[in-house]
Image (spheres, grey):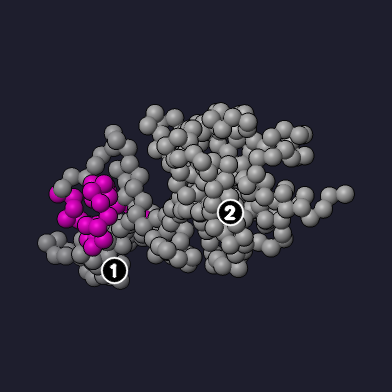
Amino acid sequence: MPGIEDYVNRLRQNQGQRGEKTPTNLGALKNIYPALVVREDDPLEQGRIVARIVTVDQEGNIGGGRDRNIPDKALPWAVPMQTGFIHARPLPGEMVILFMENPSDITAPRYWMGPVITSQLKLRFQGFREAVKVFSRTDFNPNQKLKARLEPSLRLPERIDVAMQGRDDTHIILKPKEVFIAAGLFEPDTLKANLATPAKISMRQVANEDENARLARYSTTDFVSTVINLYSNRGKFRAKNLKQFEINEDLKDLGELADSLHPAVFGDELVKVLDLIIRTLLTHIHTPQNPLAPTPDSAALSRYTVTGELQNIISNHVRVN
């Protein structure tokens, strides 16, 4: 009957501390290890890395493992096992899963998968000592639960979602009937929602809950950003003399592209001023050589100048050509 020593040996093997035979791979030498990334700057740019099989003691200190007698420069390159269509490289100090083609030969070809990141709050970097805790045989979760730490407005992948996340707060999340793309969900170096400069796109299919609605279902695409530039390389960029018609203090800080585009027009504001013009023309009274007799409509229309309410018709932050 297995005793405590057998359990300890299995636990140590799971942490890359032994290379003995184990029942988990039918009597063969163990050939799968958690490994510490030493370098990822493959001079041939083939996605290879160098990773060291190490040990971790009860205090979390990293020590010599199966590779303890091999200097870094002598460790063999490990070949990626993930598709080249997805670019994800581990950083030195992170953890990968290392596969050995021939565990009895320390110089045999190696293969890697990773990096192993156990928390969405550690995407920028998670060291080996933290990541290796994923092997701990306990229900205790060393990661703080996301929902207890994040603001309700933040949208991170949930169990049902499929996602690709970058190192530094960039996200592509495939939710049920929705594609969500974001850059900068958090305020820098915090877990607070970025409400000042959010940049996100949401594409959704929506079922209308109102049975009497004209549209039983519809789709929507929402763009949120400080400035939104929509342009064609063949479009009409703004001539310099047109800048006199726009008063926008933010424009000097929004970049050359935004400055070369036309401000988008608010349709309802445009209809409002056109309605005033039409009603004034239809109802005005004037005698020859004299201005029209003042009316409420003409008084309202007189406020629409370049320095006045004409600026209400254009957007300061949605630019087009």
Q: Is residue 151 found left or right of 140 in the rendered image?
A: left
Q: Position of residue 176 (x, y in %)?
A: 64, 48
Corner quadrant of residue 271: bottom left
- Looking at the image, which is closer to me, 145 or 2? 2
Q: Residues in magenta?
A: 241-266
Amino acid carrying label 2: it is Val
Q: Position of residue 194 (x, y in %)?
A: 44, 63
Query: Badge 1: few (under 14), some or many (20 or more) residues near its Cα, within 10 Å?
Result: some
* 53 versus 265 height, above or below: above
Corner quadrant of residue 251: bottom left
How far is mark 1 from mark 2, CA to CA?
77 Å
What residue is rendered at 33% in x and 41% in y? 231
- The tag on residue 56 is 2
Amino acid carrying label 1: it is Ala
Tell me the element at label 2.
strand
Q: Would you name the residue on which mark 1 appears?
A: 300
The earlier-in-sequence mark between 1 and 2 is 2
| Magenta stretch encompasses residue 245 | yes
Q: Position of residue 27 (x, y in %)?
A: 76, 34
